[in-house]
Image (cartoon, rainbow, N blue to C red):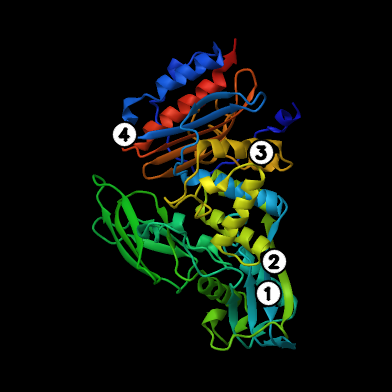
């Protein structure tokens, strides 16, 4: 079993979701020795939980050794997958682009360098890089821009007699996914996509308490005038609660921060999306260039806003910036369940395979991959790359077919290492802790209202590798109850031994 040797856990610490202590781990013996038929009966009893009488479960659990199904329930019915949709996007990205794929951003000039003066425009041409931020730079969100300034200075340029222009035409201008709820637009998890993107297309806002009865103190990063921040947060007494929310007026960059923060509390950070990612990118870049001592006489603009945008026939490429490898980007995408990264990857797949970065062309390429591995895409719906839309529909069996294929593929190690590790990191950090599933199960989780999903890989007590997909739709009880049931299945799988 050479594949088993590949399954070496890695440890990365990211933010996580909560886990309730109610999980019935006490009902699981050290090892549960039984037949698959007996195990299946046990699971049938678990899925009869009356909390989910108004919901529907879809389950597919299969051995990677024998192909035998441990359990099936509504395995071919279609479910909203939530973020388990990212399994399709990330798998297609690895298969089509390769683990060593790197996003590029090109910096051109339309002018000539006269001494230390660049007489002409600086054009930034983007191709979807989601990582121009602090995420791979020790939380220093403007480091890449400062590095670019240093490159220009090394070329002898300390003055730009022209404009800073952003070219985002590798992608379309449809920023949000099909079917996304309108009231998501202000929230970081629904950040707009773009061929040019900076800081996940969000502004970071730090909220600190003032004196009781006074406004809170706000700080924003980057320190930019691109957005107007309205402070509506009140400092309240210690007998009250902290509750801070954000709202961006549609089609604008007017962001209201409102609610309350308790006197004496630590500061907290919230994130607001921005409108027009390309404009945000070049405005921030211009600010950084000037801070580094490069004067810019012109304006910062999206090239699409110009009546007579410059072409590339006489443009000169000054330098190209490359992202980290896709294999590392996928760890953010899957472990953190990062919607923005997923949408950027979907459009990049469209650009690289179909010549233009749109969700539709990315989906066409993803479907082509799925069809080639035996999944009939006529019986599913894919409308985005992240699973944030409620219009996506996929069956548990289709997910396990994909997981089977990836297990046998040359890129399995990268795919496997991108998944959250039970009880260790990502969205699984606080689940199945102190059980046999900890540091064993590798699974992508998903959540939107009324939907909870988990799909991935696990070893039984016999070290038999298993793929599984467990999805519930249309429940109305707290999501932690769905977590508990899904965790219990993982724990029972990790404890299962054949007679």
Q: Nearer the viewer, mark 3 or mark 1?
A: 3
For the residues labelled 2 and 1, the Cα–Cα distance comes to 8 Å
Q: Is residue 85 visible?
A: yes
CB-based contact (under 8 Å), mark 3 and mark 2: no
User: What residue is rendered at 46% in x and 21% in y?
Assistant: 43
User: Which residue is more in the foreground, 61 or 440?
Assistant: 61
Q: Residues within 10 Å of mark 1 (few under 14, many from 20)?
A: many
User: What residue is rendered at 51% in x and 74% in y?
Assistant: 279
For the residues labelled 3 and 1, the Cα–Cα distance comes to 39 Å
Q: Residues within 10 Å of mark 3 (few under 14, many from 20)?
A: some
Q: Nearer the viewer, mark 3 or mark 2?
A: 3
Which quarter of the rendered picture does the C terminus lie within?
top right
Q: Element at badge 1? A: strand
Q: Residues within 10 Å of mark 4 (few under 14, many from 20)?
A: few
Please report whichever mark, 2 or 1, sits nearer to the chain's N-terminal start: 1
Q: Residues within 10 Å of mark 2 (few under 14, many from 20)?
A: some
State the residue position of label 2.
Answer: 321
Residue 361: horizontal and vertical position, in percent? Answer: 59, 61
User: What residue is rendered at 39% in x and 49% in y?
Assistant: 266
CB-based contact (under 8 Å), mark 2 and mark 1: yes
Please report whichever mark, 3 or 1, sits nearer to the chain's N-terminal start: 1
Q: Element at badge 4? A: loop
For the residues labelled 4 and 1, the Cα–Cα distance comes to 55 Å
Left/right of residue 58 with respect to residue 345 in the rendered view: left
Which numbered tag is attached to residue 405? 3
Residue 485: horizontal and vertical position, in percent? Answer: 42, 28
Residue 97: horizontal and vertical position, in percent? Answer: 70, 54
State the residue position of label 4.
Answer: 54
Q: Element at badge 2? A: strand
For the residues labelled 3 and 2, the Cα–Cα distance comes to 34 Å
Which numbered tag is attached to residue 107? 1
């Amino acid at each position: 079993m050479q594949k088993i040797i590949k399954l070496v856990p890695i440890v990365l610490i990211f933010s996580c979701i909560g886990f309730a202590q109610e999980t019935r781990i006490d009902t699981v013996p050290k090892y549960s020795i039984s037949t698959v038929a007996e195990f299946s009966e046990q699971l049938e009893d678990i899925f009869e939980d009356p909390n989910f009488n108004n919901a529907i479960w879809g389950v597919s659990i299969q051995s990677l050794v024998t192909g035998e199904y441990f359990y099936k329930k509504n395995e071919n019915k279609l479910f909203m997958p939530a973020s388990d949709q990212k399994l399709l996007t990330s798998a297609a990205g690895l298969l089509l682009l390769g683990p060593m794929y790197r996003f590029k951003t090109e910096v051109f000039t339309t002018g000539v360098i006269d001494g230390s003066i660049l007489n002409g425009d600086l054009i930034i041409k983007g191709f979807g890089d989601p990582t121009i931020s602090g995420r791979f730079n020790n939380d220093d969100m403007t480091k890449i821009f400062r590095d670019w300034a240093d490159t220009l200075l090394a070329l002898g340029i300390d003055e730009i007699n022209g404009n800073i222009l952003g070219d985002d035409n590798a992608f379309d201008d449809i920023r949000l996914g099909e079917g996304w709820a309108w009231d998501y637009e202000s929230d970081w998890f629904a950040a707009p996509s773009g061929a040019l993107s900076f800081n996940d297309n969000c502004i970071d806002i730090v909220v600190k308490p003032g004196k009781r009865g006074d406004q809170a103190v706000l700080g924003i990063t980057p320190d930019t005038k691109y957005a107007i921040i309205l402070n509506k947060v009140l400092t309240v007494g210690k007998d009250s609660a902290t509750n801070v929310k954000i709202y961006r007026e549609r089609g604008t960059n007017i962001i209201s921060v409102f609610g309350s923060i308790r006197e004496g509390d630590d500061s907290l950070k919230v994130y607001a999306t921005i409108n027009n990612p390309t404009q945000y990118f070049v405005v921030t870049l211009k600010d950084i260039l000037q801070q580094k001592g490069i004067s810019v006489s012109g304006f910062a603009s999206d090239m699409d806003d110009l009546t007579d945008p410059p072409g590339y026939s006489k443009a000169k490429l000054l330098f190209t910036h490359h992202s980290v490898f896709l294999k590392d980007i996928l760890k953010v995408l899957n472990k953190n369940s990062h919607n923005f990264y997923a949408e950027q990857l979907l459009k990049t797949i469209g650009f690289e395979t179909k010549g233009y970065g749109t969700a539709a062309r990315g989906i066409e390429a993803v479907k082509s991959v799925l069809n080639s591995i035996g999944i009939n895409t006529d019986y599913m719906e894919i409308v985005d790359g992240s699973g944030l839309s409620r219009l996506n529909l996929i069956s548990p069996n289709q997910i396990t077919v994909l997981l089977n294929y990836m297990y046998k593929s040359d890129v399995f190690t990268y795919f496997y290492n991108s998944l959250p590790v039970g009880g260790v990191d990502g969205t699984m950090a606080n689940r199945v802790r102190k059980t046999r599933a900890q540091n064993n199960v590798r699974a992508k989780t998903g959540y939107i209202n009324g939907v909870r999903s988990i799909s991935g890989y696990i070893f039984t007590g016999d070290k038999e590798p298993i793929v599984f997909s467990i999805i519930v739709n249309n429940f109305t009880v707290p999501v932690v109850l769905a977590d508990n049931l899904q965790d219990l299945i993982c724990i029972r799988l990790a404890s299962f031994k054949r007679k």
